[in-house]
Amino acid sequence: MALVEAETLRTIAEVAVAIAGFTGIVVVFGGRAGGDWSPDEAERLWLLLSQALVVTLFAFLPILLQAAGLEGPAIWRLSNGLLGITIWGIGANIAFRQRHFERVRAASLLTRCFEYATSAAGACISISLVAHSAGALATRGPFLFLFALLFLLAASIMNFWRLLMGSVVAGRHQA
């Protein structure tokens, strides 16, 4: 694995940890430290933290696989397969959990479109990762793996923003 790839993975992990850390600040300053969470806020928090954790763990996976003796394509095939299955699992969990929330149906059209587009993109990325792992999709190097991590990181940032804005709006209503 090239030094640039290892540095990129470490940087992605650092950003994911920072997002998870700042979430604690939002929880405290957003007045939610006492556990007064709406179902929507609890869902966003769970999703944000799970995405940040997955990004952090998977950013170190190729480095660990290299340390275990794997090389080049084997590292990326195994990493892609495991990440693809994990993203699929997160997506299935989200779909199962959101069945129970009326917020999806009650959300604005823009929010629903964003959530459905994100879900569709996640499914396509997951399928691409598993297809590459199985040898059915030819990509060179770590592009697909890095793209998937950045997608999860962007989704985590978006959930952080939504959680932050929900706390700001709630704070205005309480004042």
Image (tube, grey):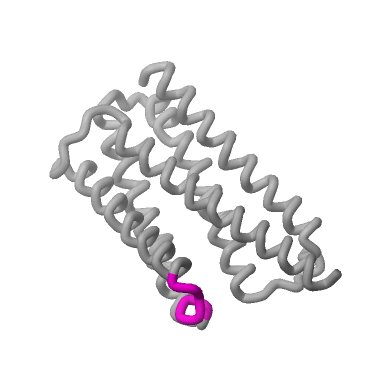
Q: In which quarter of the image is residue 165?
A: bottom right
Query: In the image shown, does 4 or 54 lie closer to the viewer?
Result: 4
Q: Is residue 101 visible?
A: no
Is 10 left, or right, of 79 in this rendering? right
As drawn, the residue found furthest toward the left would be 136
Q: In which quarter of the image is residue 132?
A: top left
- Quadrant position of the C terminus in the picture: bottom right
Percent position of residue 6, x then y: 45, 24
Q: Does the magenta stretch include residue 166?
A: no
Q: Image point 37% across, 66% down: which residue?
A: 116
Predominant SS along the magenta part: helix
Magenta-drawn stretch contains 107: yes
Q: Quadrant of the N terminus?
A: top left
Residue 84 or residue 173, whichever sits in front: 173
* Residue span colored magenta: 103-109
* Residue at the extreme top: 3
Residue sitting at x 43%, y 60%: 90
What count of labels does the image hold?
0
Please report the residue visible at 33 percent of the width from the left and 55 percent of the height from the top.
Answer: 121
Q: Is residue 91 left or right of residue 104?
A: left
In x, y percent, where is residue 11? 53, 29
> In this rendering, does residue 111 appear at all?
yes
Residue positioned most to the right: 175
In-front residue for pair 75/8? 8
Q: In this view, does 154 lie above or below 173?
A: above
In the rendered image, residue 44, in percent from the top left (x then y), is placed at: 58, 63
Residue 156: give x, y in percent of width and height: 53, 51
Residue 162 in the image: above or below residue 42 = above
* Residue 28: quarter of image: bottom right
Q: Which residue is drawn at 39% across and 63% down?
A: 91
